[in-house]
Amino acid sequence: MNIARGRIILYACIGLLFGIIDWFYLDWLANAWSGASITPALGIPLVLMMNYGIWLIPIIPVVFYEARRAERMSAPMVAGALTWSLAMVSYYAYYALLLSLGKLVHLEHLSLFGPKHETFWREYWGMFNRIILSQYLEWTAIAVVGGAAAGAAAFWLTRRVTLEAGTVEG
């Protein structure tokens, strides 16, 4: 596996930036659909596609770009896993920041800068572990496996198209 340092930094930046963008996108999506009157048979699949489909936006260009340059499948696999994993880092870091500043709805009392009642730290760490740490670990595992799978698929598709193009020309 030989991924140039510049590309690794680029993929890391794409992932970190996307994690923050996704936070705001999901916030917008929740607000946009909160008052929508659409049948559940159409609305639920549409929202699911919009919610999870956006994750293809950063990964497809990354894994295909790397797959075209790679000699081995491991390079686009690492690029995909890195991009999605760092998106999780920034997404959940922003989530933790909002929790710590008391900016999450119904959790305003958990601000680190406000008054603290006697059970504050127990409640804060319980909430942190439940809504941030556990979700981060769960989704990062999915990001690593999914990003690597996307990289492997891109490598396979790139090689297949290249072989078919060579067969047609030859």
Image (spheres, rainbow, N blue to C red):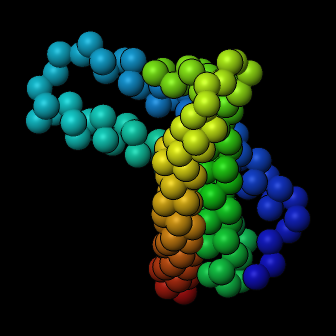
Q: Is residue 136 above or below residue 116?
A: below
Would residue 67 be visible to someone looking at this image? no
Would residue 27 be visible to someone looking at this image? yes
Residue 132 placed where, x, y %?
55, 46
Tell me which residue sits at (54%, 38%) in the image.
123
Residue 96 placed where, x, y %?
64, 38
Work out which quarter of the rendered image holds the N terminus and state it.
Answer: bottom right
Give the total of numbered labels.
Answer: 0
Q: Is residue 39 above or below residue 60?
A: above
Tell me which residue sits at (80%, 61%) in the image.
8
Residue 66 placed where, x, y %?
69, 66
Left or right: residue 26 versus residue 94 is left
Q: Outermost residue toward the right? A: 5
Tell me which residue sits at (39%, 18%) in the image.
31
Residue in front for this viewpoint, 5 or 36: 36
Residue 75 placed where, x, y %?
69, 75
Q: Outermost residue toward the front? A: 118
Q: Outermost residue toward the top? A: 35
Left or right: residue 129 versus residue 34 is right
Tell me which residue sits at (51%, 70%) in the image.
145
Q: Quadrant of residue 17?
A: top right
Residue in front for this viewpoint, 14 or 40: 40
Q: Is residue 122 above or below residue 11?
A: above
Residue in front for this viewpoint, 82 or 104: 104
Work out which quarter of the rendered image holds the C terminus and state it.
Answer: bottom right
Q: Is residue 57 above or below residue 142?
A: above
